[in-house]
Amino acid sequence: MARIVGGLGSPHAPAVGAAVDRHDEETPYWKPLFDGYRPMRAWLERAQPDVLILFSNDHFTSFFLDAIPTFAIGVAGVHEIADEGWGKRPLPPVPGDTDLAWHLSKSLVDEGFDPTVCHRMPLDHGCLSPLSALLSWTPRWPVRVIPILVNVLHFPIPTPARCFQLGQAVRRAAASYPDDLKVVVLGTGGLSHQLTGERFGYINPQWDAEFLDRLERDPESLAALRHQDFIERGGSESVEVILWLCMRGALSRQVRCIHRNYYHATLTGYAQVIYEDTENEVVAPSLRGAA
Amino acid sequence: MKPSEREFAHPSPGTYLLTVSLAQQGYRLSSFCRSLMRPESRAAFKADEEGIMRAFGLSETEREMIRARDWLAMVRYGVNHFLVFRVAGTLGVGLTGTAAQMRGETLEEFRRTRRVWEER
């Protein structure tokens, strides 16, 4: 069984990765965000997951208008670093987990989800910004990563309810995996922001706070909203919070929120959370206190 | 574009979503933006904007949007903003500069609307 022991939420803005590359974590501008990563890094070091299932979206990097998968899963043994137009970030390729990715792909298809199976899907900021903020990659990345990308840029995009159900299907798929693995799910992006039009720069901290409250305790009520509800309340690009619904769907009904941080930055309401799964413990009870 | 799609793509003032007909209209210009993912294409474009746009077969309308650094026009035309950012970025205009242009403000005016600002 691949046990999903917790879920993390993180922004995935390119600026976050750029701040990592410049070692700007302690600058006045970035400290409020990177202080929020400290408990997440510590939690990951304690949890020692074998695999991260990362919900993100492509930004016309691996995919183009020629073919836009609604859901895509990266099954490669190694994921390349993409050049999005500013040169590749100085990061080593990210290890994948082909066996678990095959199992997830097959299980999802059996459940009626039909993800596009991708053997080569270079990772862009949607995956690399959170990974590089949460993990150290020297001497090597400490965890294998399975990216599941959701189309959030070209309409029609999948409904919030469908994304929540995808997370639930991922949980069932993980539970039927024959090997014993520890898995953490990661929802990325958001929260409120809009990066186009005359409304560029729209941020709504009140809605973001409500979103985080409801994501923890009542995610179904968010899954029942329409895209337009998210766009009105949080800006057009905030619709990508459906990626957080994927993460939340993959967790137990009740979760323990042990970390929550929010930073109203220049263009985006950045949020970070740690949810512990209440059915699959991070550390086996007998080992509690040992860590 | 059918009225129903137009309404969907432009649901409220200042907001533009990419839908099928729009993306079709913006396909060639979007392809051009995507070509800038290659370092050699970025270098060539910076060295000879007009020549590269002509060689790519962009229409006069499309070339004029880039000449004018009119990022908002590109979005309205059917180019996703992440593709627009590739052209803007190659031409040295960052995200905040792109934001200011789309809002019809100077960078300083836009800055005054922000809670925090990154000094670089």
Image: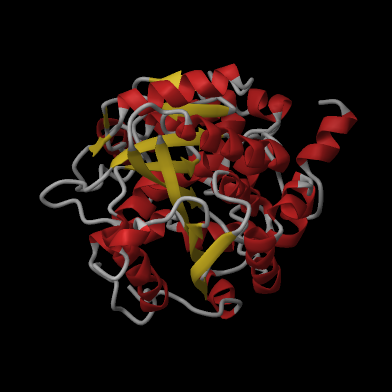
Q: Name the residue nearer the viewer: A71 or A19.
A: A71
Snapshot quadrant of residue A23: bottom left
Residue at 38% of width from left, 56% of height from top?
A: A282
Left or right, A204 with respect to B58, comes to right
The answer to whether one can see residue A45 in this image is: yes
Residue at 25% of width from left, 42% of height from top?
A: A88
Q: Is residue A150 above or below residue A210?
A: above
Q: Residue furthest right?
A: B3
Colour scheme in the image? Answer: secondary structure
Snapshot quadrant of residue A70: top right
Q: Is residue A263 above or below residue A201?
A: below
- Residue B103 percent location from the top left of the image: 65, 62
The C terminus of chain A lies in which quarter of the figure? bottom left
Q: Residue furthest front?
A: A286
Q: Is residue A162 above or below residue A133?
A: above
The answer to whether one can see residue B14 in this image is: no
The N terminus of chain A lies in which quarter of the figure? top left
- Residue A98 percent location from the top left of the image: 32, 24
The mark tally for this picture is: 0
Residue at 45% of width from left, 45% of height from top?
A: A4
- Residue B12 percent location from the top left of the image: 81, 52
- Residue A269 percent location from the top left of the image: 56, 67
Residue at 27% of width from left, 53% of height from top?
A: A48
Q: Residue furthest left?
A: A139
Q: Name the residue nearer the viewer: B57 or B7.
A: B7
Q: Name the residue nearer the viewer: B59 or A139.
A: A139
Snapshot quadrant of residue A124: top left
